[in-house]
Amino acid sequence: MTFGKPGVGVAGFRRSHEQAEAVRIVASTATVPHSRAVYYGEDGMSATAVLARDLATTRRFVADALGRLAIDNPAAERLRDTTRMFLRTGGSYVQTSEELVLHRNTVKYRLQKAEEERGRPISDNRLDLELALHVCHVLGRPVLMPMGKRASRR
């Protein structure tokens, strides 16, 4: 199910319909349950829709941005989720720990581990990092690397 932003009149309806069509690929590609209903107005969704059109290229982008964090396994997923939330909260250990219901030291440990797995600091190439984490969160498996493959480490 996809939704565009509400609009006024016939032109607004058409634009809303175009937006819903634009993000339809996200809903049909995603393997994560929270992406079954997609709203065009959600932060980053229009960019995700563009990236979902070429999954092979997006998978390479994700692997380059995330290194071994791009591997499809539960440990990497935990590290991706913690890193994504940390960046979303503006780099606050306290807020991240509250949002994820984790101890602050657990957040610190996971972020250190994420940097090790990524092969570089979280602050390095941050925009690509945030976009790659968002795409992984929204699309899931189609943009991740199978466990047997090795991700690049810059």
Image (cartoon, rainbow, N blue to C red):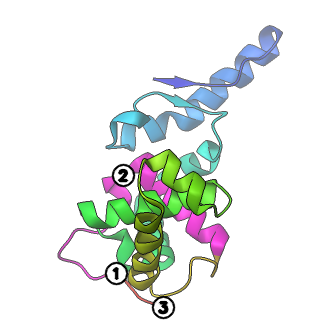
Q: Residue at x 64, y 78 (%)?
A: 123
Q: Nearer the viewer, residue 135 or 11?
A: 135
Q: Main secondary structure of the magenta part?
A: helix
Q: Nearer the viewer, residue 28 or 72?
A: 72
Picture disc at residue 140? 2
Horizontal relation, residue 88 to residue 118: left or right: right
Q: Residue at x 57, y 69 (%)?
A: 129
Residue 131 included in the magenta stretch of the image: yes
Task: Judge whether 138 appears above or below 74 on screen.
Answer: above
Name which residue type carries label 2.
Answer: Gly
Quadrant of image for the N terminus: top left
Element at label 1: loop
Q: Are marks 2 and 1 in contact (CB under 8 Å)?
A: no
* Label 1 to label 3: alpha-carbon separation: 10 Å
Which stretch is magenta?
A: 126-150
Q: Which residue is mark 3?
A: 154
Q: Where residue 37 appears, x then y in whole percent?
A: 46, 27
Q: Nearer the viewer, residue 130 or 49?
A: 130
